[in-house]
Image: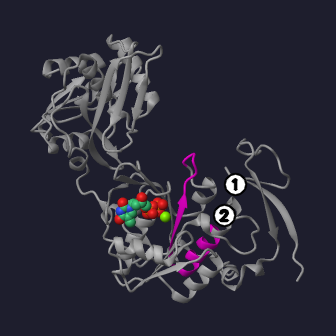
Amino acid sequence: MSSKVHTKYICSNCGAETLKWMGRCPQCGEWNTLEERVETMAPKSLGPSLSANLQSNAKPQKLSAIHFNGDKRILLHMNEVDRPLGGGIVKGSVILWGGEPGIGKSTLILQICHAMASQGERVLYCSGEESEIQVKLRAERLHVNDENCYIYAGSSIDGILQEAENLKPSMLVIDSIQTMYISGVYSPMGSPAQIRDCTSALVRFAKRTNISVMIVGHVTKEGNLAGPRILEHMVDVVFYLEGDRSYQFRVLRTVKNRFGSTAESGLFVMEGNGLKGIEDPSKYMLRNRSESAPGSMVVACMEGLRPVLVEMQALTVHSVLAIPRRIAAGYDYNRMNLLIAVLEKRAGYFFGNLDVYVNIVGGIALRDTACDLSVCLSMVSSLLDRPVSDKLIAIGEVGLGGEVRSVPNLEQRLHEAERIGFERAVIPKHSLNHLNPADYPGMQLVGAAYITDAINALKSDRL
Ligand code: TYD
Ligand code: MG
């Protein structure tokens, strides 16, 4: 059979296609991202299982005539995974798991396999990175030894789909998409062309057979899944497992979810025998907190839809450098500089000849602007070398004018602080009008309109 071959160039950043090679992608403007892809116009070479996937006989159906019997989800009984999924795995869905190498993706997915297999659901775990023995060793560490869990070490998507076709599992795992290849695509494993075609074959397979597919993808050094837009468009759910590898704390963030809220997240701690969901995140994050030292404060941030209290520390010391050092660990460096500028201009505290260090304890990365007020107060506390009362919490965003602005989910943050034992809260003055103090019987609410008011409130406390 003569097959027609033609060449295309695909941008590894945005997935745009051109017929000619160019130094710069005409769509996204990135340089040197166009990669050659040779295509053979012979769909039969994809093999019978894949060409059968193409649903050419699909007909339009009335929305009212499509019935949903309600048992389309499989609950894993792993709270920290079920909740971000929107209440369990939807049958036939394709879930992409991104994350840095070594963060715990394979571990978490093997635990999910166990959760499924122990309910009598068959699972096929395909690894292109590890041998069966290596997967078995990990499974022993996790105490996973299920009859219904099948391991397959291979890299050919055609072979994997054939095995899945025979085995008819409830879930198919591909670990990782960068180590897979499909026939008919003459690009190396891990190239955008291979990733795209392997994923699209898996998506078609999932929709046709109603088997859920979990795809593991490693992130590039820029923090994107290789060929980011290409992959994220194609799948139903995108999760990122994040964390600092030198800590045990991990966050499962939802980037996209066609069946649930992307505001949900899962919190885990990596232990010797796998990832364990954290039931009470605030207690976990504050477990090592001793009496307040100067510069130490507790911030109430939102992790997904849940409030979590986290300890943060600031340290200001006399600088011996011409340009003082500013270091932020777990916090946005530019935001820290902005807050320092506000404190200098609006409150009269000068950091010009001081090195400033801000550290978020426990390996969590804070992105919540509601922590601004705490960051400011802890820097002032360190500057004055006087501790903040450990019964006091501050919640609010700080503007460039030094004003304290209201923040979302204030009520939940306050309830969480009250539950943990905080007795006084400095909050935006504007928000005070909308709150009923009787809702917080164990807590005194203090309104601050400007950063200076918040600093005065602290001074009248113990600062
Ligand atoms: P892994 O799941 O292999 O990461 P990924 O698939 O994202 O590359 O996890 C590897 C790390 O997790 C490794 O450094 C060891 C650690 N680990 C534990 O701490 N406890 C465990 O029970 C397991 C299985 C791994
Ligand atoms: Mg892995």
* C-alpha separation, residue under disc 2 versus residue under disc 1: 9 Å
* Residue at left offset 38%, top offset 80%: 117
- Residue for point 73% across, 46% down: 27
Q: Residue furthest right?
A: 2
The answer to which of marks 2 and 1 sits earlier in the sequence is: 1
Q: Which residues are magenta?
A: 199-223
> Whole-percent x and y of residue 203?
59, 71
Instruction: Tell me if 397 is positioned left or right of 414 in this view.
Output: right
- Observer-nearest of 233 and 67: 233
Q: Secondary structure at mark 2?
A: helix
Quarter of the picture containing the N terminus is: bottom right
Q: Position of residue 455 (x, y in %)?
A: 24, 19
In the picture shown, does residue 326 fall above or below 86?
Answer: above
Location of mark 2 (residue): 196
As for residue 189 lying within the magenta part, the answer is no
What residue is shown at x 82% (from left), y 47% (from top)?
Answer: 22
